[in-house]
């Protein structure tokens, strides 16, 4: 049986491969557009490698979608998203788990929950059109945006 992290990695790879092949994009083209190596992208597609959120952000920017769009972009009739319905993305190297909190991305809002382990080392940039809502339940975080920096 696979660990949750391994299952997440394999599922993400499958979703990415479906998107890439549906758009008829070759690994080399994606590599050139993202600055990542084709061999690394291949290991992501096959679920053999973890990917940092910063690298994943480069990939989704290439496609013109959000990370949430890659996690689960298929429409559904569900109105509630239970923990068992979420599409988690684990990034053990950074100490971050990301989960889509809405049933699909065909709504007016995209809600993503990010859980940071103590001493998580995430310094990437996540961006999309719109505004952000951050709810910190426990601990201290240093957040930096183009407008200002905040400790919460």
Image (cartoon, rainbow, N blue to C red):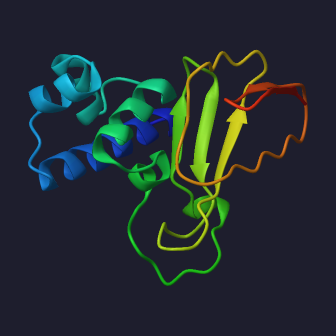
From this viewpoint, is residue 1 visible?
no
Residue at (61, 18) in percent of width and height: 123
Residue at (64, 23) in percent of width and height: 95
Q: Which residue lies furthest to the front in this view?
A: 147
Quick check: 72 above or below 61?
Answer: below
Q: Percent position (x, y) of residue 98?
A: 59, 42
The quadrant where residue 30 appears: top left
Q: Percent position (x, y) of residue 97?
A: 61, 36
Q: Quadrant of the C terminus?
A: top right
Quick check: 78 above or below 143?
Answer: below
Q: Is residue 67 left or right of residue 148?
A: left
Counting every numbered tag in the picture gives 0
Q: In this view, does 8 lie to the left or right of 15?
A: right
From this viewpoint, is residue 40 visible?
yes
Quick check: 77 above or below 56?
Answer: below
Name the foreground residue: 112 vs 152. 152
Q: Residue furthest bottom?
A: 77
């Amino acid at each position: 049986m696979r660990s949750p992290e391994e299952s997440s990695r394999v599922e993400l790879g499958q979703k990415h491969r479906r998107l890439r092949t549906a758009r008829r994009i070759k690994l080399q083209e994606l590599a050139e557009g993202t600055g990542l190596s084709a061999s690394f992208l291949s290991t992501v597609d096959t679920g053999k490698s973890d990917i940092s959120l910063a690298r994943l952000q480069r990939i989704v920017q290439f496609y013109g979608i959000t990370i949430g769009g890659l996690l689960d972009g298929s429409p559904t009739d569900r109105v509630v998203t239970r923990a068992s319905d979420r599409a988690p993305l684990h990034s053990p190297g950074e100490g971050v788990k990301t989960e889509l909190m809405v049933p699909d991305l065909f709504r007016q809002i995209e809600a993503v929950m990010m859980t940071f382990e103590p001493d998580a080392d995430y310094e990437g940039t996540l961006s999309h059109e719109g505004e952000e809502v951050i709810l910190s339940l426990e601990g201290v975080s240093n957040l930096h945006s183009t407008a200002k920096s905040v400790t919460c």
